[in-house]
Structure formats: structure tokens, C-alpha cells
Amino acid sequence: MTDLTALYSWTCSRCNDLTRGLEMRSLIVDVENCLQAFVGVAHNINSIVIAIRGTQKNR
């Protein structure tokens, strides 16, 4: 399983059921600039969740 698949399916080792109730709405990947982000809805806490994994110099 790729890192991207594990992130989208919430099966990575860091999740540990911490995402219960979160509905993934969008996964944004920009390979050229080494960016990843996701947008989700957590109905159980009436919230929108946005997470961004930052950039790194790759040139």
C-alpha cells in the first residue's frame, strides 16, 4: 500500500482510530511542489478539518 493510499483510507499506523467520525471530502496532491492536503468533515464534532503537509526544497 502506498503512503497516499494509506492516507486516503486512514489505515496508516499514526491514525489509530483517532479519525473516527471524519468523512474525507478531498485529497489534494501537488507532486511538483511536494504538497499534500486534505479536507474532511467531522460530523460528530460539527467541524470542517483541513490539514496541509508542507513543502520541502527538491531542486
Image (cartoon, rainbow, N blue to C red):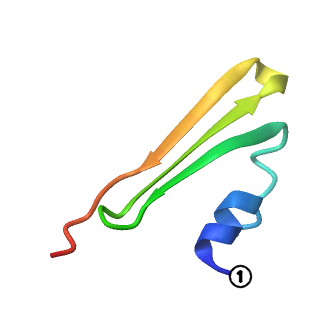
Label count reads: 1
Q: Residue at x 19, y 67 (%)?
A: 57
Considering the image in quadrants, where does the C terminus appear?
A: bottom left
Q: Determine if residue 14 is in view.
A: no
Which residue bears the numbered disc 1? Answer: 1
Residue 33 locus on image (x, y percent): 30, 61
Relative to 41, say whether 19 is above or below: below
| Residue type beneath disc 1 | Met
Looking at the picture, tell me which residue is in the foreground, 15 or 9.
9
Q: Residue furthest top?
A: 46
* Quarter of the figure with residue 13: bottom right
Relative to 1, say whether 38 is above or below: above
Residue 26 locus on image (x, y percent): 63, 44
Q: Residue at x 84, y 25 (%)?
A: 44
Relative to 30, say whether 21 is above or below: above
Q: Residue at x 82, y 24 (%)?
A: 43
Considering the image in quadrants, where does the N terminus appear?
A: bottom right
Relative to 32, say whether 41 is above or below: above
Looking at the picture, tell me which residue is in the foreground, 18 or 55.
55
Q: Determine if residue 49 is in view.
A: yes
